[in-house]
Image (spheres, helix red, strand yellow):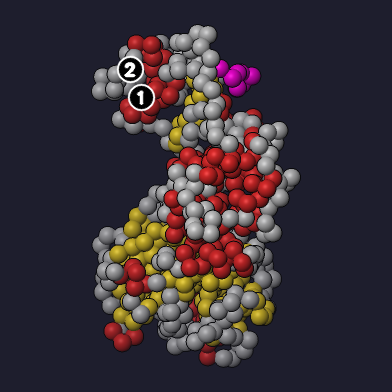
Amino acid sequence: MTIASGVQVPDMAAWPPLPPRCAAAGHALVQWVATADTDRSRLCVLRGGRASGKSHLLAWFLTGAASHPSTTAHATVPAQGLITDAVAWEMGRQLGYGPVPAHRLLDRVAADQRPLLLLLPDLHLAGRGPAGQPAASPQAILGNLLLPLLALPHVRVIAETGESGLLADQEHDVVDLGPSPFPGAAPPADGAPDFVALRGSVPATSDGRPIWAQASRPVREGILDAALEEQDGKAISSLLADPGFLIHGSAAAITAALRTPEIAAPTGLRPIWERAAPQLSSIEHDDVTRAALLQAAALGTSPALSEYLRPLAKQHVWTATWAQHGLPVSAQCQIPGNDAPLVTADPLGRLSTHNSGTGQRNGTLSSPTGIRPAGIAAADRGALLVLDEDGPLHVLASDDEDTAATVLGNIADHHGQTLLGAGNLTPTALGSCPQSPLAAVGDSSGAVHVWSLTTYQPAPRSCRLHSVPVSAVACTQDAPEGLTFVFSSGFDGTIRLWETSQEPMDSPIDQRPAVVTALAAAITAAGPVLAAAWNDEELHLWHILSGKAEVLPLLYRCSALVLSAGGQLVVGGPDGMYAMQLRPDRLSN
């Protein structure tokens, strides 16, 4: 079938059959999607009365659309019962950005530039929380997310609006399934059970505490809504104060409730929930993962909640041990030595030392004005090698005549001279090995250079591992075996391994449609382990000798990692820093 503009509509012969009532609408929808490069509107509104076939039509479209590039939907987020950020979290996951809030989603989509087709079924049923609050209306999603997305020229949207009249004032095309096939029929009665009935259906312990893990999904999803509908303050408070409900309840409902200032909440719960909610909104995480995330978010804010969740969280491959929420970190490293402090840099370039066991700041370091560290490596307490975000390496040393300062100066001079001689060799990543006096420098050509931080070398051991600039690098040394492992990531989403006594591995150890923002490696009791943070807020752990991996959610964005031989992993980023105790033996088994 060819439309007037000359754009060829994909062959739909292999698509599932459509009921006759929906056939014309189905062809119109596919025709609209296939005319992406025409002057037609970038918004298609799907209208229709109750039971007119809207949901059937969208399910049919999604079933067949993936068979052809011109009809592929890049994200489909059923909006019923969701608020703006909940839609953004799920849309961000599907687009490969991770569960980002609405303002960051808009920034990522604006920078993405690939043509995107987004589907929002049940937009007219969006909204959550107390009646009268902005989040309870679909209009909040329109103003805060949908219309700003449509302002981007590479975004197209199919929005289901029922008979609501939503988006009628926007330029749009329409696929209309007509009125309900049951004219005059009353909609089904709400019949939603009240809070008492729902609460009574939840299994309980012998002393009456609800066992939310055994409650049905409809009950966990709807019980807070029922309490809000009845304006039952006592019931609302009992749910928000119950750690079990925070783990198992509806993340969208809890978020909407906590965004309402008039609702009383336990002390500290609102900032805790803001940290954890984006990840808790995923249906893919099990109970133990959700407990570990909530426990990490509660550290430093609610000791009682954190300790309550710790036994369940300790069943995971990681458990958070301390947190400094709200302390932004752009780079960090650990000074070599047992129980040595961490060194962190904030976005303004200020350097601090922290107790590695508690995260508490215990000192500051002087740094030249104008440096914005993107990486740090330490030879000792008084000698640091710092990578500026613009490329140059700098030496920060308390004694310029010290051997360590001389060695670090040689490294900085080497890369500075290389940069002057070949502008495409700008350093782009710096990583260190807390267990050995080593550092690795990645550059814009894709090469990695390994240096000793304590012994003079006229030149590094170098190897080109990528065909694109290096985004992160880490190294670790197994001294008894005489092995040095170097790990690097490129801006093409690959992670590569190079054991420096051999040629690098032919194939990446991982490759994803995302960018690694930080790497850390260590020789643990279970063998060498690599940690990689990605810009979609995933953390990947590898047990190198067995090749086994674990994928974990990050509590927030990560720009720097430090991994100790004891298995402590410190995550630092724009939103703060926290430490987790890993169980490397769980990776190898």
Query: Which residue is drawn at the image coordinates 38% and 27% (left, top)?
Result: 59
Assign the C terminus to one quadrant of the image.
bottom left
Q: Is residue 313 above or below residue 481?
A: above
On the question of residue 426 being in view, the answer is no
Is residue 167 on the magenta stretch?
A: yes
Mark 1 → mark 2, Cα distance in angstroms: 7 Å
Q: Which amino acid does the dot numbered 1 rest on? A: Trp
Q: Is residue 500 left or right of residue 138?
A: left
Q: Secondary structure at mark 2?
A: loop
Q: Is residue 258 above or below residue 558?
A: above
| Residue projecting furthest to the right | 262
> Few, some or many C-alpha atoms within 10 Å of disc 2 (few <14, some 14-19, many ≥20)?
some
> Few, some or many C-alpha atoms within 10 Å of disc 1 (few <14, some 14-19, many ≥20)?
some
The magenta segment is: 163-170
Q: Which mark is residue 144?
A: none
Where residue 114 appears, x then y in whole percent? 46, 37
Q: Quadrant of residue 565?
A: bottom left
On the question of residue 197 being in view, the answer is yes
Q: Which mark is residue 18?
A: 2
Assign the N terminus to one quadrant of the image.
top left
Q: Secondary structure at mark 1?
A: helix
Q: Main secondary structure of the magenta part?
A: loop
| Residue at the spot of label 1 | 60
Is residue 445 on the magenta stretch?
A: no
Where residue 4 appears, x then y in whole percent? 40, 11
